[in-house]
Image (spheres, rainbow, N blue to C red):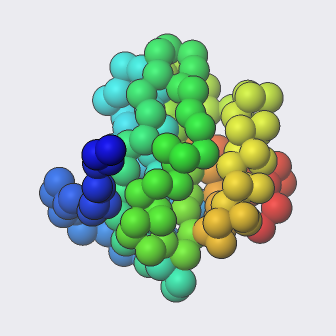
Amino acid sequence: MKIPQYRVSLVRERTVAYRKVEESRSAAAVLHALLDDAPTEKLVVLYLNGQNGLMGVEVVAIGGMHACPTVPKDVFRGAIVAGAAGIILGHNHPSGDPTPSKEDVEVTKMLGEAGKLLGIAVVDHVIVSANGTDKSLLDLGLLSS
């Protein structure tokens, strides 16, 4: 019987200069730069090192106007390969209202639990909109640090 042998590797598509992610505002600045012109929801993962330095960014899901379904393996795959100590989730609301939905909160909590099992902290989940507004689930008290 023949079975395939796989190799997992991290591919750098491009490099963008950003500084340490010290608070939700600095994470939101990165997310606005990536998502403000997106016509549909996109889920982005910011990879953080142990000092909350930004190691990388990945778009892990592209959805429709009102939702962007995802599963933990898609969210954490790149973070594991990159050796990230933590992640910040981010997505956009094309409607212009960055208020987290009930589903946003539930998915964030589920991913937080998955992250605990993997040893990768979910530090925050920031929702941005093209009009320049954003909301942090951590700042709103909807995510325990």
Direction top: furthest residue: 65
Q: Position of residue 137 (x, y in %)?
A: 72, 49
Name the quadrant of the C terminus: bottom right
Check the image and report above or below for 116 versus 105. below
Task: Give the image location of residue 19, x and y in percent.
Answer: 36, 74
* Left or right, 66 with reference to 121: left
Image side of residue 82 versus residue 41, left or right: left
Question: From where the camera sits, is residue 52 visible?
Answer: no
Residue 108: where, in percent of width, then height?
71, 45
> Residue 24: where, in percent of width, then height?
59, 60
Task: Please give the name of the residue rendered at 57% of the width and 21% of the height, measured from the top-left corner.
Answer: 67
Extreme left residue here?
14
Q: Quadrant of the N terminus?
A: top left
**Count of residue discs:** 0
Q: Nearer the viewer, residue 133 or 57?
A: 57
Name the outermost residue toward the front.
1
| Left or right of 130 on screen, residue 89 | right
Residue at the image position 37 percent from the left and 19 percent from the top: 39
Q: Is 41 above or below relative to 2?
A: above
In this rendered view, identify the residue nearer to me: 101 or 119. 119
In front: 82, or 122?
Answer: 82
Q: Is residue 90 above or below residue 81?
A: above
Which of 85 and 89 lies nearest the eye of the viewer? Answer: 85
One can see residue 24 in this view: yes
Answer with left or right where residue 51 lies relative to residue 119: left
Q: Residue at x 82, y 61 (%)?
A: 144
Residue at horizontal 56 percent and vertical 33 percent from the top: 70
